[in-house]
Image (cartoon, grey):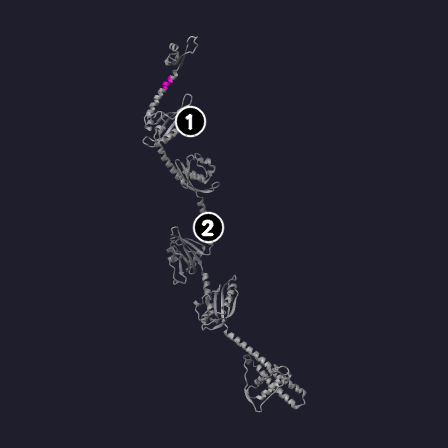
Amino acid sequence: MQEVLKTGKPWHIAQFSMPVPDDADAVWVGRVERLPLQPEFPAAITVWMQNVTRSVQTEMALRQDVALMRAISETSTDVMFAKDCHGRMRFANPAALELIGKPLDRVLGRTDAEFLEDQFAAQSVMNNDRRVMDSNMAEEVEEEVPLPDGTKRVWLSQKRPYHDESGRVTGLLGISRDITERKQAEAKLQEAHDTLQGVLNSISDGLAILDRNWCYTYLSETGAKMLGIKAEDLLGKCLWNLYPHAGNSLFGRECRRAMNTGVATHFEEYYPEPLNMWVECHCYPSPAGLSVYFRDVTDRRRAQDAAAESERRINALLEASPVGLAYSAPGGKVLVMNSEAQRIWGNPPMPERIDDYAQWKGWFADDSARLGEPVGPHEWPTARALAGETVIDEVLEIEPFDPPGTRRTIMFRSAPIHGVDGAVTGAVTAQMDITEQVSIRTAVAEADRRIRQLANTIPQLAWMANADGYIHWYNERWYAYTGTTPAEMEGWGWQSVHDPVGLPKVIELWTHSIATGIRFEMTFPLRGHDGVYRPFYTLVEPLRDASGTVVQWFGTNTDVSALQKTQEELQEANRRKDEFLAMLAHELRNPLAPISTAAQLLRLKADDPKRVALSCEIIGRQVHHMTELIDDLLDVSRVTRGLIELDKQPVDIKSVIGNAVEQTRPLIESREHTLSIQLGSLHATVLGDPVRLVQVISNVMNNAAKYTSQGGGLP
């Protein structure tokens, strides 16, 4: 105190012991200072003392704790460290120095970036430290800090900020433990778990695991997606609480049965809204609970339903088909045979293999060389199809099992069924009962044969053509007349025997008939084998079906050359008849004129015997002439044949001329012509027909008078 008064310098008392009534070991700290008084006042001092016994005790305890912590830190394998608020190292235990690989003097006061070789790791550690101090919150972080030799190690660090007396963060304390092996084990475990999870999630089945209390402990991602839920919404929750009505469903009953009996169960059930799906479940019980594998089999069930429906339709189609149908397995076993096939065969036994086909009786019924030979087991269309052959329209005659002894004619079609690898997986055989058709065809063939035979016996040329006019058959008379061959006449070869001049008209009319369906009728020439064209009357009639459609044409060619010649002869006879009648009519007029004149003379000179005799002679002569003319008219055969027979006899030509003049004189006189006759004195006789001679001369004189003008002169 005196020193303080003397010098004015304060005196700090670090620690001293001064007993107090309650504490003989009290520890104090103090300070002595001179008061800053005015000079006029005496010097004075102040003494300040504080009992720091508790603080000293605390410090001693802290020292002991620090010593303990140091001992722990030095013996611990965990890394222990302390850093100030700037990240500088203030403390590092031996494990930390081993990690860093440097002595303590090269670590204290430095940051991680200054003493760690791996700068990336150093920066990551410093970022974590900064975050803990800035947030003022303890944190556990994993950090990867390599050893000095570069070996990667993973550390789990507990970092906590520490504060000064005011609560301000002044640094960071940390403990790090090497968890590399654990992380590796965890990584392997996680990898295994991820692999298992991947497998579970990759399979099409969903997986749900329930414990013995019916609580969900696992639900695969596939299962969650299938059910349209999230796995976390089920985990830890009881099945019966989530789905109260599940106990009444097949799912609930089967799960309880599996859990209670310890026997796995398998079932399928349809779940309505909101799933609308068929689910197949496998329940596997275990001591821990129940594993339920489930999958969406809606498509399969729909496919099965569709297949069943398709099968029903196919069966209905098979039963409704008028064709016998059978399906056989590769070995020859008949698996399916519809009603028509069973009817055809008379309820046959179903063979198990191809060798059993020996029970089935059949004979080849086609036009091959094997007609009538029996069919062997491996020759049946089904057996051939199972060998890979496609059989088209094989005609066989069979004997049904019931009634035995009868025969049916069957047309077979059989085809193999190939799998994806090309192997034969079966065969389908169609069987059509054509017994009635064959009978009809036989009858038609017989009728056709008879018709053709009849057509070959008729005198006409005959042929048949398709609806389009293509001629496919001629009778024998056609070939005999034309001297052609079937190959030459096929189709449109008939044109070669037609007259080229008239052929275009024939083609025009025939084409018109084909297009319209009307009958064809025409007469045209056809060339014979001798090269002579003769006229043929051709008539072609269409054959129509029930609907009126032309299906065939029947044609005949009738040789009308004789008829045509007869017609020409008749026409010529008729012409001659007409000429003869015209001539006769003309000739009949000639005798009438002198008869009429003589009759008038008789009326005028009835008392003159000479005149009467002359008139009677004229009348008699002219009547005789008319009688001969009328006899010619009544000779019909000569008239139609145009033949005039001459009655030749010695005739006095003068009497002929006189008779002709008698007939023509009335005409000459009526025309006021002058007739001059000069006859010789000698007797003139000719060999001829007096009637025809009179006709000739009178015709000449009549024509002269007729065509000479009235009164004479030039015509």
Image position of 108 (left or right of 511): left
Q: Which numbered disc flags the more N-terminal residue, 2 or 1?
A: 1
| Above or below: residue 455 compared with residue 66 | below
Q: Which of the 4 image quadrants contains residue 699? A: bottom right
> Residue 382 location, x and y as percent?
40, 56
- Name the amino acid, label 2: Arg
Image point (37%, 17%), residue name:
57
Residue 569 appearing in the image: yes
Residues rendered magenta in the picture: 56-61
> Residue 378 location, x and y as percent?
37, 57
Q: Nearer the viewer, residue 549 or 538?
A: 538
Image point (40%, 60%), residue name:
362
Q: Main secondary structure of the magenta part?
A: helix
The answer to whether residue 697 is magenta is: no
Q: Residues within 10 Å of mark 2 (few under 14, many from 20)?
A: few
Q: Quadrant of the C terminus?
A: bottom right
Q: Nearer the viewer, residue 681 or 491?
A: 681
Residue 140 appearing in the image: no
Q: Read off the residue under disc 2.
A: 312
CA–CA distance in space, label 2 to label 1: 79 Å
- Name the amino acid, label 1: Asp
| Above or below: residue 121 compared with residue 645 | above
Q: Which mark is residue 134?
A: 1
| Above or below: residue 55 compared with residue 245 | above
> Residue 445 location, x and y as percent?
45, 65
Under circle 2, the secondary element is helix
> Residue 517 location, x and y as percent?
52, 64
Q: Nearer the viewer, residue 665 or 592?
A: 665
Q: Residues within 10 Å of mark 1 (few under 14, many from 20)?
A: few
Q: Which mark is residue 351?
A: none
Under circle 1, the secondary element is helix
